[in-house]
Image (cartoon, helix red, strand yellow):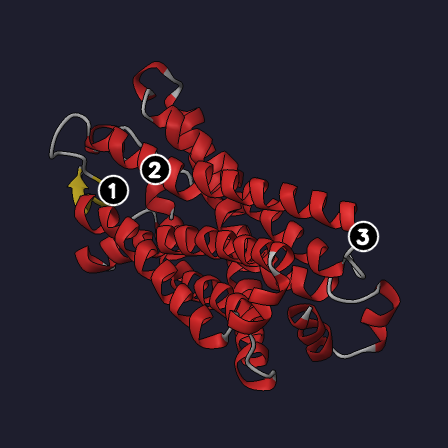
Amino acid sequence: TEGDARTVTEETSTLHKPLCNGEVLCLSLVVLNAIIFLLGFCGNALVIWIAGFKMKKTVNTTWYLSLAVSDFVFCAFLPFSIASMTMEVWIFGRVMCKLVPAVLFLNMFSSIFLLVVISVDRLVSVLFPVWTQNHRTVKKASVVVFLAWLLAVALSVPSFIFRDVVTHLGRTSCVNKYTFDRYSHSIVAYSRLVAGFVVPFAIIIICYSIIILKLRKNRMTKSSKPFKVMSALVVAFFVCWLPYHVFIMLELNHQNLNHNLLVIGLKVGTLMAAANSFLNPMLYVFMGNDFRQKFRSSLFSKMQNAMAE
C-alpha cells in the first residue's frame, strides 16, 4: 500500500517529503491506482459472479474463484490507499492503518499459494491420471483452498503487529514501526520474500518443467490453451511482484541509498503489485478462446470458457 511505499521505519518516515503537491509522479500514481481499482473491482466481481453462480462447480472453478476473491478483496481496500496518497495524510485511524496493508500481503500470499496449488494439481493430474480421476473432488479442493488462505492470513499478521499511526510536525502517517528488536525488519522482509516469492516460484517452475517433459514425451496434450492461461497468470504475478520485493530488500540498507529514489521505487513497485489484481480477470478473457471467437462471443462466455479450460 501507499504507506509501505513511503518507508517502513519511523526514522525514514520523518524524512519523507510530500509528492502530491501537483507533482506529475504522484498524480500519475493516483490516476493509475484509480484505474486499477475500477478495472480490478469490476473484473473480479464479474469472475466471481460467473465462477460462483453461472458455472458448474468444479475443481478448476474452485481455484480461480478463490483467486478472484483474493483480488477483489484487495481492490475493495485500494481506495483507502488512493485517498491517503492524494491527501498525503492518514485519516482512517489505527485499525485501518493495520488492516489495509495487511490485505495487500494477504492478496500476495493467497495468490501465490493458489498458483502453487494449481501447479501441483496439474502435475498430479498428468503423472497420476487414474488416481486423479477417482480422488480429485470439489470438497478436497475447497479444503486445500481453506488451508492456503489460513496460511496466507498467518503470514499477513506482521502488518497488524508492526503497522501503526505516527504524527510528525502535525502530519499523520501510516508506517511500519519495527521497534521490537534490531532484526525484526529484516526478518519480516526476508520471510515475505522467501515464503511469498522464492519458494513458491521454485515449486511452480519444477512442476511445469516436469509437466512439459511428460507431455512432450508421451504427446498427451490435445490443447495448449489451459497451459497458456496458467502460464500467463504465473508470469503476470512474477513481473508484477518482482520490483516490489527488490525495493523492499534495498530498503533494508536505506542508509546507503538515495532516499528519494528508494521512495519512488517503492511506490512504483507497489503500483505494479496492485496491477496484478486486475490482470488476472483480463487474462481469463483474452486467453480463453481463439482470437476470432472472442469477438463473436459474449464477455460472459469468454471468461466462462477460459475458466472451464
The residue where tag 2 is placed is 6
Label 3, secondary structure: give it: loop
What is the C-alpha distance between the residues marked 3 and 1?
53 Å
Amino acid type at circle 2 is Arg
- Taking the view exactly as shown, the residue that stands out farthest to the top is 256
Crowd band around label 3 with a 10 angstrom C-alpha radius: few (<14), some (14–19), many (20+): few
Q: What residue is drawn where x is 58% and y is 64%?
A: 39
- Taking the view exactly as shown, the residue that stands out farthest to the left is 180
Residue 298, percent from left and from top = 76, 79
- The mark nearer the N terminus, 3 or 1, is 1
The residue where tag 3 is placed is 219
Amino acid type at circle 3 is Arg
Residue 123, percent from left and from top = 59, 53
Residue 80 in the figure: left or right of residue 32: left
- The mark nearer the N terminus, 2 or 3, is 2
Return the mark for residue 276: none
Contact, CB < 8 Å: mark 3 with mark 1?
no
Would you identify the image quadrant in which residue 251 lies? top left
Amino acid type at circle 1 is Val
Q: Is residue 20 above or below residue 278?
A: above
Nearer-the-camera pick, 98 or 156: 156
Label 1, secondary structure: give it: strand
Residue 207, percent from left and from top = 58, 46
